[in-house]
């Protein structure tokens, strides 16, 4: 019985560590690119390719380029969802 408790405790510790690491990475990603869409597009070209496949999101990006001051809030909401998709259980990509 003691071995099972130790094993379960180790599994719990590994899972907690993994969750904290994912949250930390998502926070760092979000805070680095928050309010800086041009840096995201310059550093992460792979996101642009994925975005072009999503017509609604691409329209949003085009609007972002035209109306930067108002759409920063929308950009930050989108960025938050992108950064934390792994935390909320959404698949990458």
Image (cartoon, rainbow, N blue to C red):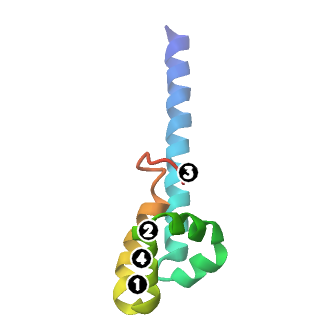
Sequence-first tag of 4 and 3: 3
**Please, which residue is most extreme toward the top here?**
1
Q: Is 3 above or below relative to 18?
A: above
Disc 3: which residue: 21
Mark 3 residue crowding within 10 angstroms, few (<14) / some (14–19) / many (20+): few
SS assignment at label 4:
helix
Residue contact at pointers 4 and 1, CB within 8 angstroms: yes
Please state which of residues 24 and 88 is positioned toward the viewer in this rendering.
Answer: 88
Please tell me how many numbered marks the rendered image carries.
4
Disc 4: which residue: 59
Sequence-first tag of 3 and 1: 3
Residue occupying image coordinates x 56% and y 84%? 38
Mark 4 residue crowding within 10 angstroms, few (<14) / some (14–19) / many (20+): few
Residue contact at pointers 4 and 3, CB within 8 angstroms: no
Sequence-first tag of 2 and 1: 2
Residue occupying image coordinates x 51% and y 83%? 36
Residue contact at pointers 2 and 4, CB within 8 angstroms: yes
Q: Is 44 above or below relative to 19?
A: below
Query: Whole-percent x and y of residue 68?
Result: 42, 90
Please state which of residues 79 and 23 is positioned toward the viewer in this rendering.
Answer: 79
Nearer to us: label 2 or label 3:
2
Residue occupying image coordinates x 65% and y 75%? 43
C-alpha separation, residue under disc 2 versus residue under disc 3: 32 Å
Nearer to us: label 2 or label 1:
2
Residue contact at pointers 2 and 1, CB within 8 angstroms: no
Disc 1: which residue: 63
Q: Quadrant of the C terminus?
A: bottom right
Q: Is 3 above or below relative to 61?
A: above
Nearer to us: label 3 or label 1:
1
């Amino acid at each position: 019985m003691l071995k099972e408790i130790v094993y379960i405790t180790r599994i719990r510790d590994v899972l907690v560590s993994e969750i904290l690491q994912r949250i930390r990475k998502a926070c760092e990603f979000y805070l680095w690119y928050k309010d800086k869409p041009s840096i995201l597009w310059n550093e992460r070209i792979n996101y642009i390719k994925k975005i072009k496949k999503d017509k609604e999101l691409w329209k949003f990006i085009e609007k972002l380029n035209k109306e930067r001051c108002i759409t920063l809030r929308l950009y930050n909401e989108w960025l938050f969802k992108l950064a934390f998709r792994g935390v909320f259980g959404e698949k990458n990509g």
